[in-house]
Image: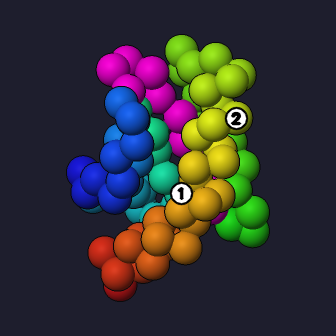
Amino acid sequence: MPVVLRYKSYKFFFFSNEGNPRENPHIHVRSGTATAKFWLSPEVRLASSYDLSSGELTELARITSENRELFERTWHEYFG
């Protein structure tokens, strides 16, 4: 589970095995038991979430957008 970014209490990461066939680039976010998943292209959008407020999701979407290039680059470097 490569962690790409830490922000406040949140970890932004992807799983080493992202399906077969592999899903399109996305990032998972976790803080305690709260989770979210954001698709990275064609634009950042929420795929799913659990136990996060709308305010938290708005903030996490912003952080994801600001770091989208990093997340996509790391995804492609990891998975080739």
- For residue 58, say whether it is visible: yes
In the image, what residue occupies the spot 68% across and 66% down? 41
Q: Which residues are magenta?
A: 31-40
Q: Position of residue 4 (x, y in %)?
A: 34, 58
In the image, what residue occupies the spot 37% across and 18% down? 33
50 or 54: which is nearer to us? Answer: 54
Quarter placement of the C terminus: bottom left
Q: Is residue 34 magenta?
A: yes
In the image, what residue occupies the spot 75% across and 68% down? 42
Q: Position of residue 57 (x, y in %)?
A: 64, 31
Q: Secondary structure at mark 1?
A: strand
Q: Position of residue 11 (x, y in %)?
A: 35, 41
Which is more N-terminal, label 2 or label 1?
1
Look at label 1 and name its amino acid: His
- Disc 1: which residue: 26
The label nearer to you, 1 versus 2, is 2
Rendered image: mark on residue 58:
2
Look at label 2 and name its amino acid: Thr
